[in-house]
Image: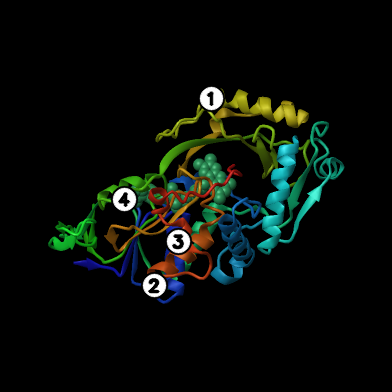
Amino acid sequence: METADVVIIGSGIVGSSVAYHLAQQGCANVLVIEREAHQGKGSTGKSMGGVRAQFSTPVNIQMSKYSIDFFSKFDDVVGHPADYRAHGYLFCATSENHLAYLKANRERQNALGVTNVEWVSPQDIAKMVPQLRVNDILGGTFCSTDGFVDPHSVMMGFMLNAREHGVRLWLDTAVTGIQGDPGKADVPGHNADGTSALRASASRRIAGVQTTRGFVSTRVVVNAAGAWAAQIAEMAGAQLPVEPLRRQLVPTEAFDRLPQRFPMVIDMSTGFHFRREGKGILLAWNDPRETPGFKTEFDETFVEKILTHAASRVPVLAEAEVNPRRAWAGLYEMTPDHHAIIGPAPDVDGLYFVNGFSGHGVMHSPASGRVAADLILQGRSDLIDAHQLGVQRFNEGRLLEETAVL
Ligand SMILES: Cc1cc2nc3c(=O)[nH]c(=O)nc-3n(C[C@H](O)[C@H](O)[C@H](O)COP(=O)(O)OP(=O)(O)OC[C@H]3O[C@@H](n4cnc5c(N)ncnc54)[C@H](O)[C@@H]3O)c2cc1C
C-alpha cells in the first residue's frame, strides 16, 4: 500500500509552496496529488501575478512582508526563476475617505517594518504615468517593492525544488475520499448542571485518502485545493467557508501609448487596475455584481464594462484594441472576511487547511507554505500569530476585516 507522512491535495502555487517548505524543514516523505494532467490549471494559471505589502490588516501586511522578501531572493534560494519585477503598486485616491484609509494603512505598514510606502501628490502620479487623468485625484501611496511575479514560474520553482528533495507528485489523480479512523467510543462527561452525560469523544483521526489511483495511507492531509477546498473538507466531514467567485482579466493587443515600465495602478474610485503585460496592457476590475459559483467562462459583455472604466481613467486606452478571445476568467477562493484560513481542522486530527486566499494566494504563497509547514511539524509558527487565521474564528466571531481586496 502507498504511504506518505503528509499528503497534499492540490498542486497549485499554495500546495507547491507547502511541499517546498515541508521538504526544507526535513519532511520529504510527502505526496502531492493533483487531478489535472498539468500543474497550474486552477486559479494559479489565471492570476494577474500582483504582489503587494499595501494591505490594511497586520496579518496580511506580515504575510506580504515575508513573501515579498522571499520573492526578491527566490531565484537564488529556490534555484528557479520567479520573475519578480519590483515595479511598485500605485494607489490613487479620489476622496478624503480614501486618503484617510491610505494614511491609516501606511502607519500600520510602517509600524510593521514596511517603511518604503511613500505619499505621492497628483503631480507625482502624473509624472509616473503621464497618460492618467489626475484632475480628480487627491493623492495616493506608492510602494516600490510591490510589483509582480510569474505565478506559473513560482509554482514550478517550488515544486521542482521540493521534488529534488524527494517530494512525490501524482498528476492526473483525483482525491475522491478521505478516510478517518472510526470515532473513539463515547466517553462519560458532565452537563453544565452537574448531571452525568455521554459525550462523543475527541475528534476523528485521518487514516488516508482514496484516489483514482488507489488508497494512500497517511496521518496528515493538507487541503490545498483552492476554490474546490470546501468539497475536500466535506470529504473529511469538516466545514470550510470557502466559496468560488469568478474574476475576469482583459489583455489589450500591443499598446505603446503607455510607458514600457510603470506600476500597477489602482483607481480607488472604481477599483479598476492595470499593469503592463509584455507589449500590451492587462486590465482588471472586479464586477461587484458577480455572484459565487464555479463559473469559469469569460463573459464577453465584460469587455465593454471594463473599457469604460479604463478609458475614463486613462483616456488613451480608448484606442487600445481588445480581442475578447484572449481574455480569460478564473476563480477567487473567498472567505467571509477575505482572509486566508490556515491551520488544523478543529474536529479532524491531521487535517490542515491552507485555503481561502480571497485574491491573494499568489502573493502570499511563500508565507502560507512556511506557516503551514511550521504548524504541521512544530505545532506553532513564529512568522505570524497563526491562531488568527484558524477556521474557528468564524464560529467564535473573531472575523478579520480587510478592505483592500482587489
Ligand atoms: C483572474 C484572477 C486574478 C488573480 N490575481 C491575483 C493577483 O494579482 N495576486 C494574487 O496574489 N492572487 C491573485 N489571484 C488569486 C490566486 O490566483 C489564487 O489565490 C491562488 O492561485 C490560489 O492557489 P491555490 O494553489 O490555492 O489554488 P489552485 O491554483 O486553484 O490549485 C488548486 C489545485 O487543486 C486541484 N484539486 C482540486 N480538487 C482536487 C481533487 N479532488 N483531487 C486532486 N486535486 C484537486 C486543482 O486541480 C488545482 O490544481 C487571482 C485569481 C484570479 C482568478
* Label 1 C-beta lies within 8 Å of the nearest ligand 1 atom: no
Q: Position of residue 21 (x, y in %)?
A: 46, 68
Q: Is residue 113 above or below residue 42?
A: below
Disc number lying in front (4 or 3) = 3
Residue occupying image coordinates x 64% and y 58%: 84
Residue for badge 1: 300
Q: Quadrant of residue 129?
A: top right
| Of the image marks 1 and 4, the number of the one nearer the N terminus | 4
Q: Secondary structure at mark 2?
A: helix
Is residue 286 at least partly visible in the picture? yes
Residue occupying image coordinates x 50% and y 27%: 299
Q: CA distance from mark 3 to mark 1?
A: 42 Å
Residue 233's label in the rendered image is 4
Query: Quadrant where the N terminus lies?
Result: bottom left
Please, what is the three-letter code of the amino acid marked with disc 3? His
Query: Quadrant where the C terminus lies?
Result: top right
Q: Quadrant of residue 308?
A: top right
Disc number lying in front (1 or 4) = 4
Disc number lying in front (1 or 2) = 2
Question: Mark 1: few, some, or many residues within 10 Å (few <14, many ≥20)?
Answer: few
Residue for badge 3: 387
Residue for badge 2: 377
Disc number lying in front (3 or 1) = 3
Residue occupying image coordinates x 27% and y 59%: 348
Q: Position of residue 256 (x, y in %)?
A: 76, 38
